[in-house]
Structures are given as structure tokens and as C-alpha cells.
Image: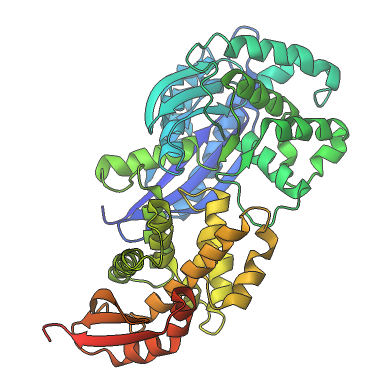
Amino acid sequence: MENLKTAIIDIGSNTIRLVLYKYNNLEGLREFGNIKTVARLRTYLQANGEMSEKGIVLLAETLSSFKKIIDDYEVTDIKATATAAIRQATNNQTIINRMEKETGILIDLLTEEEEAFFGFVAVAHSMDTKSAVTIDIGGGSTEITLFEDKKLQKTISFPFGTVSLKEMFVSGEAISKEEKEPLRQYVRQQFEKLDWIKQVGLPVIGIGGSARNAAQIHQQLIEYPISGVHQYEITREELTNLSSYLETLSFEQLKQLDGLSSDRADIIGIALEVFSELMAVVEAKTFQISKKGLREGLIYNRVLQSNDHAFDKYNVFEGYARRITFEYGRTEDERTFLRAITEQFYRECCRLNICNFNEEQMELLKRAAQVFAIGEYIEQDSSNRHTFYLLANQSIAGMNHVDRVKLALVASYKNKDYFRRFAAPFITWIPRDELKTLRDFGAMLKFIYALNVSKRNIVESIEFEKIDDVVHIIVKAQHLPMAEIYQCERQKKHIERIFKKPVQIHFYKKGD
């Protein structure tokens, strides 16, 4: 697939959102537009089951405005989907026909199973969690899935969401302490009907705006040192404490709360109780947040239909590395070279007992090698600072937040002093002995990166020999690379510190 530009329209019970995506084989998938309207379509469902004319007109006006934006961007591939609010309306076919006639947009009415499936697709292709229970609570429905080893096992959709639960249990603007108990009992009874999630002990993954807002509020309260909510983790106790804190705020204070969208001020307390009750039934230790949901699942599925190798759910990081390195000027050949030569270097260290082989550590090194010093694209002299900030403060598919910081520390290594500065906010996250290992890995990559300073990928192999008390590094290349010879001599002090032995570097032309 050369180039794809697609508009995804998600017509939910609470919000209607337009997201514009583009995809190509080199750059991968990118979002380039995101517009949201808070419509609360669920509130326009009447006693007879039909959606009112007022709700239909609101939907038509929103879609018409979206269509103008789509046309401005010259996007012709449009995928519009509707979920619970339209699904539950007895006049849904009339609504769909009118929208096509009045706006030119054909709506695909998703079944409960399809809605749950696309949420799973998004999680599986953007997170490294192999098995989990997911929850996507919208305004009018709640989808639960169970997946094991990235394979979907069970799905169910409950006909309640934050808006409908508010109608059932809340008398004022936001849920009160007294109203929480009957809500908890009701939700717990619904979840306990599912034998396939009871006491499975897996993480619960929250999908959608309420889960993202919960994470954002929590991060603000604890002064979280990095950005992003994707793969953020919260314990059930922390969820309970967060809920208790929100109880102390007035509705006006909730609307002004950092991290909370004002249109969710009346429903965030409900969502937190639902998340907490599900965790209790599952006996989950952690609540993980996925920034990716239905819309991402739809676009992943759309791309995979044309190119079934576009995304690999079993190696999620690889897609991220390909995209980010391309964005910052690194070729695919260079990325592949850095990964391969790093593995050779690490295995040679282990062969000489400089390191003890560890599969996870080698994987971290290979990942860090691909993005090492990408901050050069912004500014050469301070590339380490830019590299650390770029990696630590953006969502990285396939990595939790602790692993993201580890990657940033290794890939931004310049010297011990800078490493210490960058690591300072995270000393409670990473044990001291592991920090030392990360520092050593950064020093290794500093040297390895010098093996390709000319960016010609001409080094073909690297071997170690220990003679007397000296480590000899034998480098074979396509021809004698003068820039690499000069740079490696400058950087060998970093590995001499790790090896605790003098190092001599020998470059040979291939065939000599």
C-alpha cells in the first residue's frame, strides 16, 4: 500500500468524533486531524425507543460539518460507524438512510461483537500486554473482552454506559457518595454473571475517554514526571483514592480540574466505580490505560485488509521504531544495521564473561540502538537531551512507562553526569543496580554508534579477543572507514570503564 488517507467517524452515545489518518509503508500510520463534538445522543432516545427529531437533526448537522472538513483535507475514503445510541434506537434504519441522503455519509451500524472486536484489535496492536480483560465504557454501552496471548477469547456488550447509568442512579449533576453503593451493587451483579472473567487475575485494560481522563487526573495529582497515558498503570487502591478525592470537589471544581475534560465532569465518578468493580471481579492487580480504542481498531483493520504485514501485534515496538526513525531522518538500512551490530557486540561481551546473557536486556539494547541519538535531527550539540525528551515524553507502542524511561536513558547516553541528571526523577522507579546496568548499556551504545558515524553501514562484523589483560576488538568492514576509526578511538573510554581493562581496536578490510 503506497498511500492511504482515511477519515474515521465514530458516532458514540456521548461524543461524535472525526479522526483523519494517513498510512504508507515507510512512515507507517499517522493521525493528522482530530475533531470532537459532545452530542450525548443517548439522551435523545425517547420512551418509545425512537431517537427524537432533535437528536437526528443534531447528528445530521455534526456529520455535515465533518464532511466539509473531510473535503477540505481532500480525503475520499470515509468509514463512519455508530454504536450504542443508534443501535438502541428503534428507528435506526431511518436515521441511517437520512444521514446518507442529507450528508452523503453512509453509516455502518456496528454490532456489540464488532464494537468489542475493534477495541481488542487496537489494544493488541498497540500494547505489549499479552493477556488481559478489556473494558470500553461509552455513554450507552460497555464492552468487555478477554484475550489470551493476543488472541480474542470472549466478548460481551452490556446495554449500560456512563450516561445511562447516570440516568439510573444519579439525581444531581455528579454522583454522590450515597449513590455509589447501589451503582456498585448493580454493576458487580452484571459482571459476576461472566464466569470467564471471575478471578482470572489478569490486568484490566481501560479503553476510551473515561479511562484516559482517569489516568490524566491521577498523573496531575501525583506530579507524574513524564507525559502520556498509553500503558499507564493504576492499582485498584489508587482508583479508590482517586474516586474519594473527586467526591470532595463540587461540580464546578470538577469542570475546572486539570486532566478532566469538562464534558466528562458529570460521569467520571461513575466510570471509576465501574472500573473498580470490574477489577474486583477479575481480581486484577493493575488497571492499564490504552490510548487506542475503537477508532484505531477500525483503521488498523482497514490497513491490514490491504497489507496483512503492516502491523505485527507480537512485536508492537518494531512498528514504532520504523516510524520514529523515519521521522527523524534515519534510514531503514541504518536502523537494521544498528540493531544487528548491537546484538553482535552484546553476545561478544557475554562470551568473554563481561556480561551475563539476558534475553530481556539484549532486547532493550537492540531497541535502544535503533533510536540512539535520534535527537541529532533537532540539534547535534545537544542531541542527548532531545533524545531523552522525545523518548520519555511520547507514547511508545509496546512499552510500559518504566520500560520507556529505561529506553530513553540508554538511547540518550552521553556521559555519566548527564545519565545521572536524566535518571534523578526516576530513582524510585528503577533499582540502583539496574540503573548501573542501564548506564553501562548506554556507554556500549555510545561506542557502537561510533562504528557507523558516517552512516554508510559498512561494518560487517565485530569480534572480541582477550590477550593478557587487554580486550582486542576486531572490526571487519567493506573498506577501511576512516571516520569510524577516528570516532571509535575517541569513544573507547566508555567501554574501557565497563570492561575494566584496556581496549585496542583493530579495523580490517573485508577479505584481509
Q: Is residue 309 above or below residue 287?
A: below
* Residue at 51% over, 21% down: 200
Q: Quadrant of residue 503?
A: bottom left
Q: Quadrant of residue 471?
A: bottom left
State the quadrant of the C terminus: bottom left
Q: How is the image coloured?
A: rainbow
**Number of marks in the rendered image:** 0
> Picture coordinates of residue 55 (x, y %)?
62, 25
Q: Is residue 104 visible?
A: no
> Picture coordinates of residue 188 (x, y %)?
65, 13
Q: Is residue 86 visible?
A: yes
> Picture coordinates of residue 436 (x, y %)?
56, 65
Q: Quadrant of residue 366?
A: bottom left
Is 86 or 110 nearer to us in this picture? 110
* Residue at 42% over, 36% down: 130
Left or right: 256 with respect to 313?
right
Left or right: 487 with respect to 201?
left
Q: Is residue 283 above or below residue 388?
A: above
Q: Is residue 378 above or below residue 339?
A: below
* Residue at 60% over, 42% down: 36
Is 294 or 190 nearer to us in this picture? 190
* Residue at 27% over, 69% down: 333
Left or right: 127 with respect to 337?
right
| Residue located farthest toward the left when viewing the structure as drawn | 511
| Residue located farthest toward the front when viewing the structure as drawn | 468
